[in-house]
Image: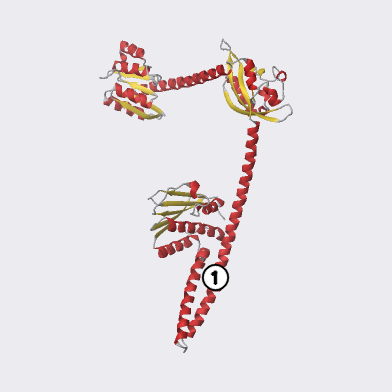
Amino acid sequence: MVKILTIDDNEINLELIVEILKKQPNTKKVFTALSGNEGIEIAKKEMPDIILLDIRMPDLDGFEVCQLLKNNKATQYIPIVMVSALGKNTDDRIKSLNAGADAIIAKPFNPKELVSQINVMLRMKFAEDTLRRQNEIQSSMLKEQAKEFAESEGRYIEISDYALEFFWEINKDGFFTFISPVVEKILGYSIDEIVEKVNFIDFFIATKKISTRKKLSSIFLKREYFRDLELATLNKNSEIVWLKINGFPIFDVNKEFTGFRGVCHDISQRKKTEEELSKSLHKINKYQKKLRSLNSRMIRVEENERRKVAEYLHDGVGQTLSITQINLSSLLGKKLPDEIHEMISTSIELISESIHNTRMLTLDLSPPILYELGLVEAITWKLDEIEHKYNITTKFETSIKSINFDLETRAFIFRIISELLVNTIKHANANKIEVLIDKTKNFYNFTIIDNGKGFVFNKSSFLSKGSGFGLFSINERIENMNGNFVIKSKPGSGTKIIVSLPSNLS
């Protein structure tokens, strides 16, 4: 993001420059200041990439502002371009440069010249920033190098003997010129078997891969620092040993490259742990897939049993009760004692209530409308039932006439929508529920919106077992169907739930 600050006591000049800069694609933010003091404060706060500065201003002139900015450690590297009617005056140009300005443009200026000068300054700033960062890194590494090698070689080796790491040095051709004795503890090779006989790049079995070899070769050619490279080598028993490698280039007093120094740390145990963890995770994932598959089968069995029970209640119990009711009703026309008539009437009322309850239970278990007419009609029926039973206003919107899933999938989806609606009735304290169905390229989206009390939604707690909302089971079913489950809610703002399921479900 390019930020530009322009300082000028003339508002018209500021507006002109802002309009020119806003047309440039790379300019993201333009700050303006009507005085030198205001400009200095903005520069310290916003740290712009370039400053356009007028010379003649009432409180502080451009020369003073420029000197103050260049003398401040925080702002000293920001390029400053003097933009002034005095820009053609040789004395003022010299004074501007002596104050620290990086360039001068005379007013009236050509907008293209201004933009070009800004782009030049930005390129220079980018290059200088990059160079400073590199110098800072080099300075830091040199300090680290001096610290690491400040002690005598004897103590250096003594310390390394107690760690699972060995220090090394290679020449500009890549051959080892020094390696600490602990290498024998880690790899089984003696110093004499490595020094002046083994090339650093060939030392690692991973360099048989062209990409790894190219990476190391590039580091050597560019004399780059390298940190936390993880490569494998073989010990004397031909067993794999993993090493984490850090190194930096070294130069002689004439700044001639002489090689690299660094350290290799044995991370074999960590790698082994990671590998075992990876295997464990693989087993866990495999087990989770089995559990999901089992859960899916259980849901299918549950739905089939629901349908069987519903059919039994409708075809068996329901018809039996209906016939019994008819038979009892026929007795009411006969001359029987009053107490018998009363008992028969009471029995008919009880049977009628049982028939109604059986019908409602049948509809709850497995509504025939779902299998006979389809999912859209079943959801419409469910909302009508909620409206009449709970006195909640419902609204259903969809442009989709039918959803062509098989019976089992339709039953799954209907069960999910029904459970979400029951959750809303139980917990939301809502008096209005909307259900929307739409279709994108690859998904059907089922949206449930209520105007209830809402809540602070935390996915990890609400979609976990024991949350009390049944959302864990719903989420599991949706995941089994390769769908998405999204809940959006805030206290006092109701709740919006979106269930997205692939359109190719079967």
Label 1 Cα crowd, 10 Å radius (few <14 / some 14-19 / many 20+) = some
| Residue hosting label 1 | 313
Residue 56 relative to residue 193: left or right: left
Mark 1 element type = helix
Q: Type of residue at label 1?
A: Leu
Residue 237 vs residue 174, the one in the foreground: 237
The chosen color scheme is secondary structure
Residue 94 relative to residue 175: left or right: left
Against 271, residue 414 (above or below) is below
- In which quadrant of the rendered view does residue 263 lie? top right
| Residue at the left extreme of this rendering | 58
- Residue 210 visible somewhere in the drawing: yes
Q: Give the residue at x 46% y 77%.
A: 349
Quarter of the picture containing the N terminus is top left
- Residue 156, position as x, y percentages in the image: 62, 18
Q: Give the residue at x 63% y 47%.
A: 286
- Residue 473, position as x, y percentages in the image: 53, 54
- In which quadrant of the rendered view does residue 161 lie? top right
Quarter of the picture containing the C terminus is bottom right
- Residue 153, position as x, y percentages in the image: 63, 15
Q: Give the residue at x 69% y 18%.
A: 195
- In which quadrant of the rendered view does residue 200 lie? top right
Q: Give the residue at x 66% y 27%.
A: 207
| Residue at the bottom extreme of this rendering | 335
Counting labels gives: 1
- Residue 113, position as x, y percentages in the image: 36, 21
Against 348, residue 71 (above or below) is above
- Residue 172 visible somewhere in the drawing: no
Residue 123 vs residue 298, the one in the foreground: 298
Residue 472 vs residue 41, the one in the foreground: 472
